[in-house]
Image (cartoon, rainbow, N blue to C red):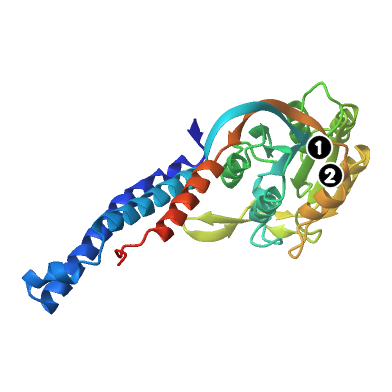
Amino acid sequence: MRFANSQFSYLFFLVIFIILLFIGEDMRRKKLLEGFADKNLIPLLVVSLDIRKRILKRILILFCFLFLVLTIMRPQWGFKWQSIKRIGLDIIFAVDVSKSMLAEDIKPNRLQRTKLALSELVKKLKGERIGIVAFAGESFLHCPLTIDYDGFLLTLNALDTNTIPKGGTSISKAILKSIESLKSRFKQSKVIVLITDGEDHEGDYIKVAELAKREGIKIFCIGVGTPEGELIPLREEGKKAFLKDKEGAVVKTRLNELVLQKIALTTDGAYIRATNNDFGLELIYREKINKLAKRELESKMFKQYDEHFQIPLALAFLFLTLECFVKERRKD
């Protein structure tokens, strides 16, 4: 036998509390009687009270409470094996963590807004395996594919512009690392969500996008930033400054939508530009990704225990009913 809610076993300590209440009630009644009449007359005043029946009533109340606690703890014995299947998609979120993601044309900044949007989306997921590839000049599998959404959020919150030491932005390396992370014998139900400002400083992104298509992977792109561009703020000795190039000129980062549109088009995916009002991640998931063909991601057997809380519940009701029929007063 096992208890599904064994954490409620502490309620058994309340039995001691109830016993103390009964003792306190007897002491209070005795004190009231002693204040009302002489001690020698008290036995005559309580002659109609059947002490044994009072004790019986209290025992019945205690048993009722004990079996109610057992009901709450949900006793289980006997089981049958059941198979549970998880149906969904494999999704890698490739997140740009280069310095340009510190630009504040999307509030509070591009990277923080990305993390907020991902956190909100994860709350709505049910069956998908999800992971994170962080990229700048290099790419790194920051979170392998998992159904542990709490663990995913922990790694997501740890993302910052120091996650990848090498500067710059290589979208092609991000896609290659994402393809590698999605490797399986299945050529379906695999998705890359590329979240970046689209500034690609190296690599052939079209070539790797075609590779993704051959692997059955669709790439959906979220463009973060504005075409007009924004300066990249930095903190230097506690003061706000702006990123400068080698010549000392401030760097302005602009959203390159053309790159992201070409990648999405190559893989039959979709592109959307993030705005302050709507990041677009939930929209692209609801309208595009969630409608893709899903497959069985895992299947496992687990024990389904038989519930028997009805037995202690019935006994608790029985003892409560019996207690109602026990009268403390003696019959004339």
* Residue 309 shows in this picture: no
Rendering quarter of residue 212: top right
Residue 73 point in image, percent of width and height: 48, 43
- Residue 299 visible from this viewpoint: yes
Q: Residues within 10 Å of mark 1 (few under 14, many from 20)?
A: many
226 or 272: nearer the viewer = 272
Question: What amino acid does circle 1 point to?
Answer: Val
**Left or right: where 152 falls relative to 40:** right
Q: Is residue 23 left or right of residue 36?
A: right
Which label belongs to residue 289?
2
Residue type at mark 2? Ile
Indicate which disc, 1 or 2, sits on the residue closer to the N terminus: 1
Instruction: Tell me the SS state at disc 1.
Output: strand
84 to 268, vertically: above or below: above
- Please name the residue shown 11% across and 73% down the image: 34
230 or 190, which is in the foreground?
A: 190
Q: Determine which of the numbered discs, if any, sits on residue 191 in the image.
A: 1
Mark 2 secondary-structure assignment: helix
Say if mark 1 contacts mark 2, CB within 8 Å.
yes
Q: Quadrant of the C terminus?
A: bottom left
Q: Is residue 305 left or right of residue 287?
A: left
